[in-house]
Amino acid sequence: MPNDAFTEGIVPGGLTSHSEVKILCCYLLNIQNKPVPQDVLVSAVSKDGLVNYFELVSALTELTDSGQIILEDGCYRISDSGRQIAVMLSGDLPFSVRSKAGDSLRYLAEHERKSHDNKVEIKKTDTGYEVLCSISDSSDGPLYSLSVYVPSLKAANTVRDNFIDKAEQLLRYDLSLLTGEDLTEDN
């Protein structure tokens, strides 16, 4: 395929064809098989330099305008015609791009889902940052919460991301320590 896409910031092996970018979008929405928040899809595809951000936005707009994908309530979902594109043409994309973008999308979509139940607030203090973490089970309030002080915003962001991704493991481990019962996943 000819190089007809914006190529600024693309890593070697990334997509340089506008049609390939459109196929990748359809492919990703097809394998996810549920609505994907707009920012999650954009991040999954552009964060590792697989495509140029502006090329991606252009491709998503064209796919939406032509009906291959549908944007509702800030989330993309694939239409039947988009699914046909994904099935018929995704083999034209490099396996490494499909794999990397698919892994990134799955991780970011799961992280987004978990962030609804696992809340984190970062507050600046005189000596660093306080990171307030909680797991919500229902509207009755937090099921579990903790507060951690860290010296930098970078450390606070790391704590936030790790808590969101691993809150269930942390809760299970802490309950095991506090109750004396083995509540780890392996049992």
Image (cartoon, helix red, strand yellow):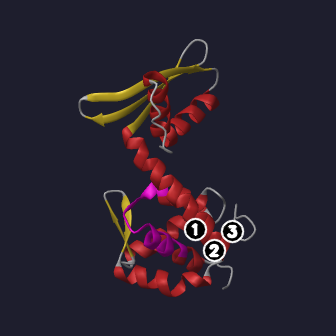
Q: Amino acid at mark 3?
A: Thr
**To which residue does mark 1 refer?**
55
How far apart in space, not on screen, are marks 1 and 2 (Cα)? 6 Å
Q: Which quarter of the picture shows residue 103?
A: bottom right
What amino acid is found at the position of numbered circle 2 in the picture?
Ala
Under circle 2, the secondary element is: loop
Asked whether the residues under the numbered discs 1 and 2 touch, taking CB atoms below 8 Å apart as contact, a structural biologist would say yes
What distance separates the C-alpha of mark 3 from that of mark 1? 8 Å
Q: Is residue 184 above or below residue 125?
A: below
Q: Residue at x 53, y 85 (%)?
A: 89
Please state which amino acid type lies under the numbered disc 1: Glu
Q: Mark 3–mark 2 contact, CB under 8 Å?
A: yes
Q: Residues within 10 Å of mark 1 (few under 14, many from 20)?
A: many
In the picture provided, is 22 more to the left or to the right than 84?
A: right
The image shows residue 144 at horizontal and vertical percentages of 38, 28
Q: Is residue 41 left or right of residue 21?
A: left
- Name the foreground residue: 18 vs 114: 114
Magenta residues (range):
24-40
Q: Of label 3 and label 1, which has the lower sequence position?
A: 3
Residue hosting label 3: 7
Q: How many marks are shown on the rendered structure?
A: 3
- Judging by the rendered image, the residue that carries numbered circle 2 is 5
Badge 1 or badge 2: first in the primary sequence: 2
Magenta span has 173?
no
